[in-house]
Image: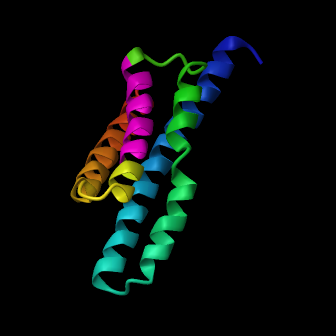
Amino acid sequence: MNNEKRTRVMRSGFAALAWLLTACIAVQTLLAGAAVFVDPAYWRSHVVFVRILEWRPVLLLILAFPGRFAAAIKWRAAALFGLVILQYMTANIPGIGLLHPVIALFMFMLAWRTAVAAMRP
């Protein structure tokens, strides 16, 4: 596979993964809402589902380099991983949990913007 084709494949994979991350964040938010408004048993699903999405930002960062994305997109992928770490902190350190849903909003916005940017030539 030549370099140009490899770059296109990496960029396509990055974009697909960014859209999937965006969708996963929406599902994770839905599960939290279901736990609050429907049945607290949904908290278990919320906790388990995070294992599915937590490594996607690392994969984005890895794909960003062979995909030859601009530095801004690489920084966004790194920021998304940093936000995942902050989510764990706010979920487990007493007193700062109120930031957890706010960080989720920023994660969704950043994932969305990253996915849109990845679609540009």
Q: Which residues are magenta?
A: 72-86
Q: Quadrant of residue 48?
A: bottom right
Q: Residue at x 61, y 27 (%)?
A: 10
The verdict on residue 58 being magenta is: no
Q: Residue furthest right?
A: 1
Decide whether the magenta segment is chiefly helix, strand or loop: helix
Residue toward you, 68 or 81: 81
Q: Residue at x 68, y 12 (%)?
A: 3
Q: Is residue 119 above or below residue 36?
A: above
Q: Is residue 117 above or below residue 111?
A: above
Across and down, in percent, residue 76 comes to 38, 29
The quadrant the N terminus occupies is top right
Q: Residue furthest bottom?
A: 39
Residue toward you, 11 or 66: 66
Q: Residue furthest front?
A: 94
Q: Is residue 99 left or right of residue 89?
A: left
Residue toward you, 22 or 91: 91
Q: Is residue 43 left or right of residue 98?
A: right
Q: Residue at x 43, y 29 (%)?
A: 78
Across and down, in percent, residue 53 comes to 52, 52
Q: Residue furthest top?
A: 3
Q: Is residue 27 left or right of residue 105?
A: right
Across and down, in percent, residue 13 comes to 59, 36
Across and down, in percent, residue 22 comes to 41, 50
Q: Is residue 7 above or below residue 23?
A: above
> How many marks on residues?
0
Q: Quadrant of residue 55?
A: top right
Colour option used: rainbow
Q: Is residue 121 visible?
A: no
Q: Is residue 70 visible?
A: yes
The quadrant the C terminus occupies is top left
The verdict on residue 84 being magenta is: yes
